[in-house]
Amino acid sequence: MTRLIVIRHAQSEGNLGPFFTGHNNVFLTPHGHKQAEETARFLDAYPADVALSSDLLRVQQTARHTTERRGMELILDPGLRELDCGTWEGQSYPSLMAHFPDEWNTWIHDSIHMIFPGGESMQEMCNRVQRTFARIEEEYRGKTVLIFTHCTPIRTMITKWKGQPISAINDLYFPYNASVTIVRCEDDGGYTIELESYDEHLKQAGLHRENKEEKR
């Protein structure tokens, strides 16, 4: 049996303001470091064979709370990156709504057809992420894998694991910062989700999300 334990990065500086972060490198906040440490403690209950992370800084910082606690190597994989928002990265939501009303409407209501100028389309990002997870699943077959990544890649994979079309991503919630999703890869090619965006450990520690979850 292959088990994937997928963790969204903890609260970053990009989560505090209403702007797109994308591939920009931002740090975890002090609150985010506390979230990441609490999630690392929660993950103590799950032995793992390998740990992989997006190479973006906020995810690396989240992952190292777990890997340093375990004395594990952290393998960086750019295929696990967030959506590349191109020229929208670093721009505020109010500014984008004012200057690109049609594109903003597409992003909010029909995101799978969004193409970011100078960046990726949503479809390109979905293809990239699903290829990356397929490779990880094949390379580490029969093992338990820690995967530290971002909000949109997790939503992309949840549609696959639930057998939904990728267009269903527009209706999905946003996984909480430092939350844990666990999926079992069955021998018949199916998937069983054991935990989905789990963050009760953060609530119990008083470290639940402080920011409003937006499309970033």
Image (tube, rainbow, N blue to C red):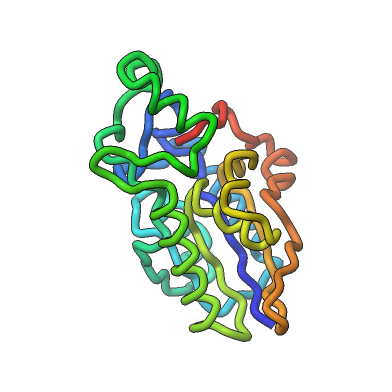
Q: Is residue 2 above or below residue 29?
A: below
Q: Quadrant of the N terminus?
A: bottom right
Residue 48 in which image quadrant: bottom right
Tell me which residue sits at (52%, 64%) in the image: 147
Q: Nearer the viewer, residue 130 or 55?
A: 130
Q: Along the line of sight, which residue is nearer the eye, 191 or 127?
A: 127
- Viewed as shown, does residue 28 lie left or right of 43? left
In the picture, residue 194 is in which quadrant?
A: bottom right
Q: Position of residue 26 (x, y in %)?
A: 33, 40
Percent of width and height locating residue 81: 39, 55
Task: Tell me residue 67's x, y (percent).
Answer: 49, 66
Tell how many labels: 0
Q: Position of residue 8 (x, y in %)?
A: 54, 50
At horizontal 37% and vertical 66% (from top left) the residue drawn is 77
Quadrant in which the C terminus appears: top left
Q: Residue at x 62, y 61 (%)?
A: 160
* Horizontal relation, residue 22 to residue 62: left or right: left
Q: Is residue 11 above or below residue 187?
A: above
Quarter of the image for residue 79 reads bottom left
Q: Is residue 42 visible?
A: no
Q: Is residue 53 above or below residue 155?
A: below
- The residue at 27%/40% (across/down) is 86
Q: Nearer the viewer, residue 153 or 194?
A: 153
Taking the image as drawn, is residue 31 in sight? yes
Q: Nearer the viewer, residue 99 or 52?
A: 99
The image shows residue 18, relative to residue 8, as above or below, that is above
